[in-house]
Image (cartoon, helix red, strand yellow):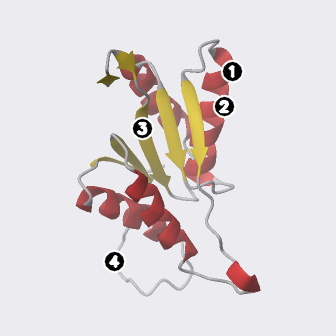
Amino acid sequence: MRCGGVMADFRVLITGSRNWLSAHTIDVTLDELLAQHGTLTVVHGACREGADKMAHNWALNARHASSFAAVTAEAHPANWRPGGKFDKSAGFRRNAEMVALGADVCLAFVAACARPNCPKLEPHGSHGASHCAQLAEANGIEVRRITGG
């Protein structure tokens, strides 16, 4: 994307399951976007495992491999314990905040729900990643869903 003749970072919102296992899928997908756009800002929810962590690791490795700082990681951790109490809606609020910041594309790496005792009987994707992808779509951001993981 160009802005006044200057290359602007292509913003990629990453949402993904904590139980996503394929770093290779994330690496290849982000490599392709970097080759297409030249610079990337990788926006993610700063989870310590799964797709967010893999995308963050890719961004750090890509940044170090480039003397031009073509990749920037932008982490948005959820505040799970405001005021010392556990807040199970923190991830959903964080997702809404990331979407509100805008992105050129949302990559949704969605694995099957692994929540013990989930009330949904039919197979479905992880709740947080699916929520973020739906919010992005509702806000006019192109969403590319990658399943499996």
**Amino acid bearing label 1:** His
Tell me whether the residue at label 2 lies in contact with that at label 1, contact meaning CB atoms closer than 8 angstroms. Answer: yes
Disc nearer the start of the sequence (3/4): 3
Q: Which residue is identified by label 2?
A: 60
Q: Position of residue 94 (x, y in %)?
A: 52, 65
Q: Which residue is identified by label 4?
A: 122
Taking the spot 37% from the left edge, 83% from the top edge, the residue there is 121
**Total marks in image:** 4
Query: Neighbour class for label 3 at 10 Å: few (<14), some, many (≥20)?
Result: many
Q: Is residue 27 above or below residue 68?
A: below
SS state under label 2: helix
Taking the spot 32% from the left edge, 24% from the top edge, the residue there is 3
**Amino acid bearing label 3:** Arg
Q: Is residue 1 left or right of residue 46?
A: left
Taking the spot 66% from the left edge, 26% from the top edge, the residue there is 61
Q: CA distance from mark 3 to mark 4?
A: 34 Å
Q: Position of residue 28 (x, y in %)?
A: 47, 28
